[in-house]
Amino acid sequence: MYEALLSASDVVGVANDRSEQEHRSGGKGDVGSQQDRHAQSVAPKVFIVHGHDLLAREQAARLLSELGMTPIVLAEGSFAGRTVIEAIEDNRDAVFSLVLLTPDDVGASAANPSAQRPRARQNVLLEFGYFCASLGRQRICVLMKGEIEMPSDFAGVMWKPMDPGGAWRVWVAADLEAAGLSPHLRGLLHKPA
């Protein structure tokens, strides 16, 4: 945990360094940096895997937009007669995935049916697996909201809490930065709704 906090503070330090550089250059930079910004004007697409927690989905989409990414939310698109997996495959140009594990379902072992615990929706786990295979785990950020039961196969998967205070926003930015996507770190300055 300590190492993760140090990493998060590094992201904030990078944001401060970038802001200072922009301030010194009057926000304009040189012609080369303007060309670089134009070349990067196509925002990287980030696929949001989510369950039924619409507030979490909207907060995640808003943060990604503020960080200069294009959030892809399957529920907002048209299926046009396609299956869900076909719609996901149509978004294979996404370069990162933000997975929201929220307590939308409950479940228990058949051996002890009265011991129900909150769980993420099954589609979320399937889509998480799809993006692990297609993007690699280094291009996925997993956020967990509340207390949920994690599948035993997820042992070793790093996840971050989607806390009400908004610290999760720094984790997302840090993971995007680690994946080489150069998020606009000024987006972290906006207060989460």
Image (spheres, rainbow, N blue to C red):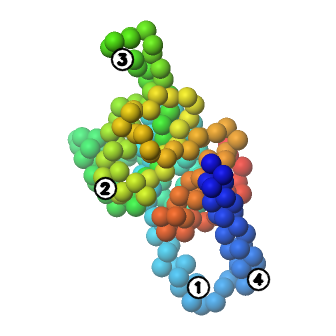
Residue 72: x percent and y percent? Answer: 43, 51
- Measure how far apart labels 3 and 1 are at the Cα level: 57 Å
Q: Which residue is mark 3?
A: 109
- Measure how far apart labels 3 and 2 are at the Cα level: 30 Å
Residue 172: x percent and y percent? Answer: 56, 53
- Measure how far apart labels 4 and 2 are at the Cα level: 41 Å
Q: Are marks 3 and 4 in contact (CB under 8 Å)?
A: no
Tag 3 secondary structure: loop
Q: Which label sits in the foreground, 3 or 1?
A: 3
Residue drawn at x 31%, y 47% as measured from the top left = 130
Dot 4 or dot 1, earlier in sequence:
4
Residue 21: x percent and y percent? Answer: 71, 80
Q: Which residue is mark 4?
A: 24
Q: Is residue 51 left or right of residue 153?
A: right
Q: Which label sits in the foreground, 3 or 2?
A: 3
Q: Which residue is mark 1?
A: 33
Kindly identify the amino acid type of the residue bearing the numbered disc 1: Ser
Kindly identify the amino acid type of the residue bearing the numbered disc 4: Arg
